Image: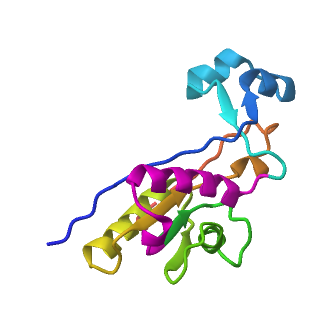
Amino acid sequence: MIYSRIRGTGSYLPAKVLTNADLVNMVDTTEEWIVERTGIRERHIAADKETTCDLAEQAARRAIEAAGISHRDIDLIIVATTTPDRVFPSTACLLQDRLDIHGCAAFDVQAVCTGFVYALGIADKFVRSGSSKHALVVGAETLSRIVDWTDRVPACCSVMAPGPW
């Protein structure tokens, strides 16, 4: 039986930082309120010209180096993102070009918070089936572009089910 394992990891954080003090100047809140509810003190924000692919590329290069393999060994690229640079081509294809990787499948998975976990699961299936030997899985987001930092209304979701009401 073939098994898969994570051989190397890499990460990248943009240099631009948004602190709770910055948010206090944008919306009626306090640093204590934010920290008490989220534990967050600062967030790294993509610069104006920094793309999701830029973030993905930096993390991918570090992961490939940590794995001790060549970019030429990669035979599958999956990027988990809800904020792709374009609708087409996928961010994974843009990353594939930047990393100079040819002749392999490259696609995005868009499932918001669980996207990276789903992407790992998909890569695992490719490796365990023998379809891939070295899958590159990257989670990258530029959610700061779509967040309204002045909106204090919490995000809500609900589950609907059939039944007697």
- Secondary structure mostly taken by the magenta-highlighted segment of the chain: helix
- Lateral position of residue 51 relative to residue 106, left or right: right
Give the residue at x 54% y 56%.
60
Q: Which of 79 and 67 is in front in this view?
A: 67
Task: Say how many tags the image has.
Answer: 0
Along the viewing direction, whichever of 100 and 6 lies nearer the viewer: 100
Residue at image position (52%, 50%) is: 62
Image coordinates of residue 88 in percent, x first then y, are 71, 78
Between 21 and 34, the one nearer to me in the picture? 21
In the picture, measured across the screen, residue 85 lies left or right of residue 163, that is: right
Q: Nearer the viewer, residue 43 or 75?
A: 75
Residue for point 62% across, 67% down: 95
Q: In the rendering, at what x and y percent does residue 61 appear?
A: 55, 55
Task: Write down the quadrant of residue 108 in the picture.
Answer: bottom right
Q: Is residue 160 visible?
A: no
Residue 60 inside the magenta-drawn segment? yes
Relative to 152, is 156 above or below? Answer: below
Horizontal side, residue 106 vs residue 2: left or right: right
Residue 5 in picture, x, y percent from top left: 29, 58
In the image, farthest residue toward the left? 1
Q: Give the range drawn in magenta.
A: 50-76
- Residue 54 picture location, percent across and down: 69, 56
In what quadrant of the picture does the N terminus appear?
A: bottom left
